[in-house]
Image (cartoon, grey):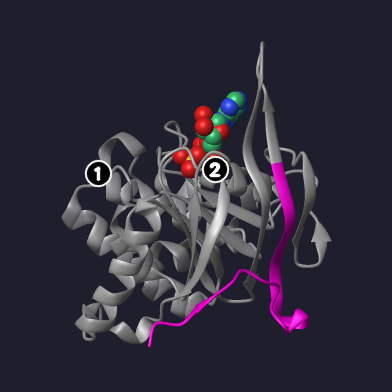
Amino acid sequence: MLKIVKPQIAADPVNIEIEINGLSKVYQTKNSTFQALEDVSLYVKNEEFVSILGPSGCGKSTILRILAGLEDATSGSVKVAGEEVNGPSAKRGMVFQSYTLFPWLTVRENIEFGLKLKGMNAKERKEVSDKYLELVGLERFANSFGKELSGGMKQRVAIARSLANNPEVLLMDEPFGALDAQTKQSMQKLLLDIWKKEKTTIVFITHDIDESIFLSQRIYVMEARPGKIKEEINADLHLFKNGELVDVDRFMRIKKHIISLLKH
Ligand code: ADP
């Protein structure tokens, strides 16, 4: 049976990494106001992989930017690791759809960027960047520059750079949205491998239903105008084994259900 539960704060508060309660966001434009989010509540457990899925314009990126501290909430509470978010922090790593590497730095220097800012010495930085270069399979490209890399490789660097800072949560805004289908698939598998090894808490924004089911343990499905959580869905990773779909029936049930939610 497909298990569908209403959005709620989980019973085990000790294990909660992200807690959003009654979040609303109103954008003020020159002549009008626009309610982008209305009364959004959600939680993400420590080490959990959660997707936020919904049509373009439903407020997914707004939630992520507020979580990252890049945007203020109009009302409501947004907590990460028990602390109210009130500005950007290295504790929250971000990976965007557009490639955000520093073009004048090599792959290694990009990965070490935040560590250098923190004052870590060169030897320690190299140890950390070696680890994350290996994790994303880019050891041979340590000295390359962004323009020499494919889109998928750039996103690997962006993921390595975020993880090198040892963030409490990784916030990903359609990171594979600009990639071709095959690269996208291999990046999804890589991300799952990384998540299992690193045990990072991940919030992943997407409008791709298959991607959300493939990657996440839970999915928050949103609706637009104003942006709200429509339903919380338990997907589970047992649908897949070594990246291959093994429970086609259950996958299709979840997918059909999400399609019908998005239609209405
Ligand atoms: P999504 O990520 O789901 O595509 P967004 O969070 O980017 O949606 O945007 C939600 C809504 O808020 C959209 O209608 C968008 O036009 C509007 N919006 C986003 N940013 C701003 C802004 N800075 N000023 C005014 N409206 C905005």
CA separation in Å, label 1 and label 2: 29 Å
How far across and how far down the image is residue 44, in percent? 62, 70
Disc number lying in front (1 or 2): 2
- The correct choice, above or below, for 217 with respect to 175 in the image is below
Magenta stretch holds residue 192: no
Q: Which residues are magenta?
A: 1-24
Q: Residue at x 77, y 39 (%)?
A: 74
Q: Specify whether residue 219 is in view.
A: yes
Q: Specify whether residue 166 is in view.
A: no
- Which mark identifies residue 150? 1
Q: Quadrant of ligand 1?
A: top right
Q: Residues within 10 Å of mark 2 (few under 14, many from 20)?
A: many
Q: Residue at x 59, y 49 (%)?
A: 64
How far across and how far down the image is residue 94, in percent? 55, 50
Magenta stretch holds residue 10: yes
Mark 2 lies on residue: 59
Determine whether the residue tagged by mark 1 lies in a helix, strand or loop.
loop
Determine whether the residue tagged by mark 2 lies in a helix, strand or loop.
loop
- The correct choice, above or below, for 257 with respect to 171 in the image is below
Q: Residues within 10 Å of mark 1 (few under 14, many from 20)?
A: few
